[in-house]
Image (spheres, rainbow, N blue to C red):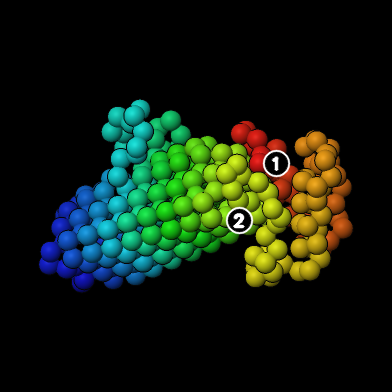
Amino acid sequence: MTAIHVTAIVDPGAELDSSVTVGPYTVIGPHVKVGAGTTIGSHCMLEGHTTIGCDNRIFASASLGAAPQDMKYRDEPTELVIGDRNTIREFCTFSRGTVQDAGVTRVGDDNWIMAYVHIAHDVQLRHHTILANNATLAGHVHVGDWAIVGGLSGVHQFSRIGAHAMIGFQSHVSQDVPPYMTVSGNPLAVHGFNAEGLRRRGFSAERIAQVKQMHRLLYRKGYTLEHASAEIEALKGGVSDGDDDVQLLLGFLAASTRGIVR
């Protein structure tokens, strides 16, 4: 049977796999679903239409699935969906979505989410990300695979952070951060690209060199965004497995609505 502490309150309508562990004084609402192998610490609050996958570790005092902090919200049945193998540390707060967007706040798989992180309504957090202590993602923010957000950093609503990007400590992110780039500060500035992260993920030396060239074309040549995009497009075909890297960056630039940090 599910290991539920005697002081925990679990609504009969909640669906918990038999291998789920629930700590003392935790409260779980009627529309919550929790997958196999997930552990939930003490004093947590899981509410709303919240679905949590398998093998997650949820530490003490997390609040998951509360109503969004949006004055337009009128109790619509929106959702929070969390994938598998995430680590969610103490005092994190994840809100449900709103009908003004897709209606779902989504956290992917294998994310490392440290204490006091806030994930607001309609955030789309992909896989293998790291959010350091007190990182705050406002509503409608999108974060790509393998991105890192430094501690005490704030991300403005509707901003997008590309895959493999790194946000430094205590940064103010109010524009889109392209894939691969390393940024920090207030005002935010680009300081290079995430070479070490790419090496750790198995990128070849040739692919990393191509990403370095893309960084130079976008940030070091003084080109307009249109000119830089054309030069980056011309890199296709030059590096084994490198065309996907080029297309990832070009697709991000083309989709940007807030403008990129420059």
Q: Is residue 92 above or below residue 156?
A: below
Location of mark 2 (residue): 166
Identify which residue is drawn at 53% across, 55% down: 169
99 or 169: nearer the eye?
169
**Residue 130: x %, y % from top left:** 51, 60
Q: Which mark is residue 262?
A: 1
Identify which residue is drawn at 78% across, 63% down: 207
User: Is there any visible trace of residue 79 in the rendered image?
Assistant: no
In this rendering, position of residue 59 left or right of residue 170 = left
User: Is there any visible trace of residue 195 in the rendered image?
Assistant: yes
Quadrant (top left, top right, bottom left, bottom right) of the N terminus: bottom left
Q: Which mark is residue 238?
A: none
| Mark 1 surroundings: few (<14), some (14-19) or many (≥20) residues within 10 A | some
**Residue 131: x %, y % from top left:** 48, 57
In this rendering, position of residue 143 left or right of residue 242 = left
**Residue 49: x %, y % from top left:** 31, 46
Q: Secondary structure at mark 1?
A: loop
